[in-house]
Structure formats: C-alpha cells, structure tokens
Amino acid sequence: MASRRSIGEDRAAGIANISRTRRAQLVAEFEGDLGIDHKARAKAIYEAKRWKVIKTIIVWTIALMFFAIACQKLWLMGEAVDEPFSDLNPMHDLFGGDQ
C-alpha cells in the first residue's frame, strides 16, 4: 500500500525544485514588498568595499614612508663611519668604562 505524503512535504519539495532564477525573482518581489531598496543596498556594499581599499592604500603608504625614512637614517649613520663596525664596543656601551 502506498504511503500518502502530507501537503507540507509537497510544498517543501516544490520549493526545492524552483530554479535559482525564479527563486531570486521571488525573493526580490518579497523584499520589494518589505520596502528593501536593492540599489541603495548595492551602493552601500560598494562604498564599504571602496572605503576598505582606500584605508588599505593609506596604511601601506604610511608604512612604506616609515620604512623609507628608517632606511635613509641607517644610510646616513653608515656614511658617518670611517670603517665599518670599527666603533662597536659592547663593554663600553653596556658599562660605560674608559677606553
């Protein structure tokens, strides 16, 4: 004997078989009935992504500027030395004794 399906199961199976395009149309109609503005929503998402890109560019620019300044300072410090590593004296640097 065949078992009978309930109406809820038929409806669930019917919703599962709707194509994605039709499902998107139904969702858009439902959201339109609720008063959701898709253009404003899409524009807000775009602006959020755009602002994130701008912030990333600003942060990387500042980081590169600090790196360039540090490299320049190290270069100038290296130019002031006659012989490389000749002024290193860890004992004097740590304890401040006379040479």
Image (spheres, rainbow, N blue to C red):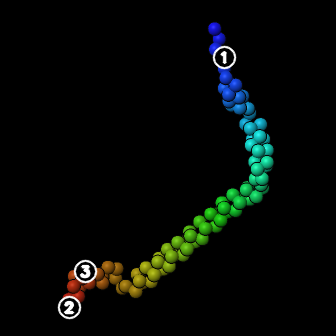
Q: Quadrant of the C terminus?
A: bottom left
In this view, the mark in front (3 or 1): 1
Horizontal placement of 51 versus 26: left or right?
left
Comes first in the chain, label 2 or label 3: 3
Tell me, yes or no, whether the two marked residues, 2 and 3, touch with CB atoms within 8 Å.
Answer: no
Mark 2 surroundings within 10 Å by alpha-carbon count, few (fewer than 14), some (14 through 19), many (20 or more): few
Q: Which mark is residue 98?
A: 2
Please state which of residues 29 and 46 is positioned toward the viewer in this rendering. 29
Residue identifier under label 1:
4
CA gap, disc 2 to disc 3? 12 Å
User: Looking at the picture, does residue 47 appear above or below residue 90?
Assistant: above
Residue shown at 66% from the left, 17% from the top? 4
Q: Identify the residue at the far bottom of this view.
A: 98
Mark 1 surroundings within 10 Å by alpha-carbon count, few (fewer than 14), some (14 through 19), many (20 or more): few
Give SS at disc 3. helix
Q: Residue 91: give x, y in percent of width and height.
A: 22, 82
Comes first in the chain, label 1 or label 2: 1
Comes first in the chain, label 3 or label 1: 1
Residue identifier under label 3:
90
Query: How many numbered marks does the figure carry?
Result: 3
Horizontal placement of 80 versus 25: left or right?
left
For residue 93, what is the image quadrant? bottom left
CA gap, disc 1 to disc 2? 102 Å
* Kind of residue indicated by mark 1: Arg
Residue shown at 32% from the left, 79% from the top? 85
